[in-house]
Amino acid sequence: MNNKLTLAVLAVLTTSLHAGPPAAPTPQPAERKLITWDVQERVRWEIKDNAFDFNSGVRTINDDNWVLNRFRIDLGVQPTDWLKVYAQVQDSREWLSDRADIPGVLGAEGDDSFDVRQAYIELSMNEWGLKLGRQVLAFGDQRLIGPLEWTNLARTFDAVRVTYKGSNYTVDAFASSVVVANRGSFNQSDTFNGNETHREQVFSGLYFNTRAFAVADADLYALHLHEAGNTDFFTLGTRLKSKPAEPTLARHEGKRLVAPASSASPWDWDAEFAFQFGEVGGRDLTAFAGHVGVGYTIPGCPISSRIGLEYNYATGDGDPTDGDVETFQNLFPTNHIYYGFMDVFSWQNIHDVAVSWKTKPCKNVTTRLDFHAFWLADTNDVWYRANGTTAVRPLSPAARNADNYAGSEIDLVVTWQARKELAIEVGVCHFFAGSYLGDTGADDDADFGYVQATISF
């Protein structure tokens, strides 16, 4: 009897040795907090020279330096797992500039004293979610829909958004109107018929994302924009973004634990394509835009380094006098991070070849060095700035006959996460004027620099 018991104990011990370490405990969901709050203060000093007219012989109101300050307080209340109420108040100021401190006038960030930036109710029931109220909309890489956090005001929408989350996909449906800053009064959108621009704007769409494919996430979207003045068009698009390969799991060889051998590829890639049709200002719209990019993270490098190459294209209008529009409509993007930090281009009437080098020389410091070469897709259309509406040069016979090389830009940005609560960023940018500028007027180089500090707690 005792021998049988001894053999049983030995068998259990032997099995345990070969089974490896015990499985990690199943992580428990984070405890829900009834009230959450955050405070953020961001201050940025900027200096610009020639970025408005590329003419060093004329000092414009934008050849200047100024200070931008943005302060936010947000509060969330979640009494149950299925209900959340959220509000965010923002105060934005522009100091020391010669421009009128009115948002959007002569390129000014302007003053917008304490106002409601976000205020929504969010309901979550199993796979379904509903968010109703003033909120941020951001989809994909934000090339068409994003909050544009770089600017002092940033962007929000009065919207209703319904989300369904499946096992490996998500579907969003939304209807919205973008909020416009009104100095000295409550910021409103067309939702409540309070916008002074009377755009009658309704921006809606369906956005589908799936993680079912092994090598890439895939998006499909259909967007619709209606505005007064016979503007009514659709944007159909797709986006693909590679997934990093997962490392192999640790395994046991006898009693020895073998470390995981990473199978992660140093390569990454992404692509996005969009087609538009409908009407803009009563004229027929047919337009297209595309982006492709590839990156390589150098393996074994003591300093984490990634080199990237990308190409961005969007159609321009070949004949502005006919009844058609061929200029791609950039909608509500976050352009600042894609087409040069000087914000002189949008995803419209553009060829952009860009090379980037990102490094992390130490734990709390990252650097980004970008080089862009820009051409106009069609010189019969204007060169559009990052806001998608302002032209760098007016359309003229000289512009139509000009060479389409606009110029090149080099940007260097260094970010230091000094503490968990404090991030400091420094940027230096230079634009090398191209032959298009020389063929249409002054063609002096332009410069931009900034220092930014963000405190969050």
Image (cartoon, rainbow, N blue to C red):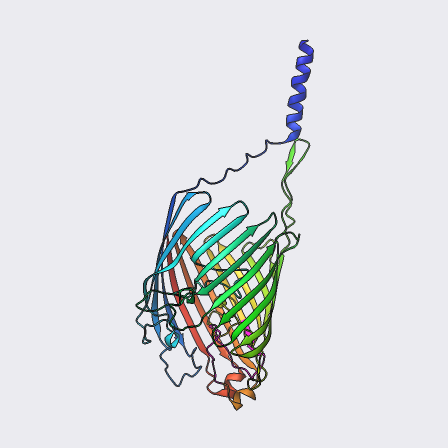
> What residue is drawn where x is 63% and y is 39%?
250
Pick whichever, 240 or 283, lies toward us. 283
Image quarter of residue 400: bottom right
Give the vertical position of 334 relative to 25 (above or below).
below
- Asked whether residue 388 is drawn in magenta, I would say yes
Q: How many callouts does the rendering have?
A: 0
Residue 182 appears in view: yes
Pick whichever, 157 or 18, lies toward us. 157
The quarter of the rendered structure image containing the N terminus is top right
**Direction bottom: furthest residue:** 397
Give the vertical position of 261 relative to 337 (above or below).
above
* Magenta extent: 372-394
Question: Residue 408 at x, y = what percent?
Answer: 53, 76
Image quarter of residue 177: bottom left
Residue 294 appears in view: no
Question: Residue 44 at x, y = what percent?
Answer: 37, 65
Indicate left or right for 420 with 316 as reference. Answer: left
**Direction top: furthest residue:** 1
- Asked whether residue 94 is drawn in magenta, I would say no
Task: Look at the magenta stretch and give its main secondary structure.
Answer: loop
Question: Residue 68 at x, y = what percent?
Answer: 35, 66
Indicate left or right for 418 with 174 as reference. Answer: left
Question: Residue 281 at x, y = what percent?
Answer: 51, 78
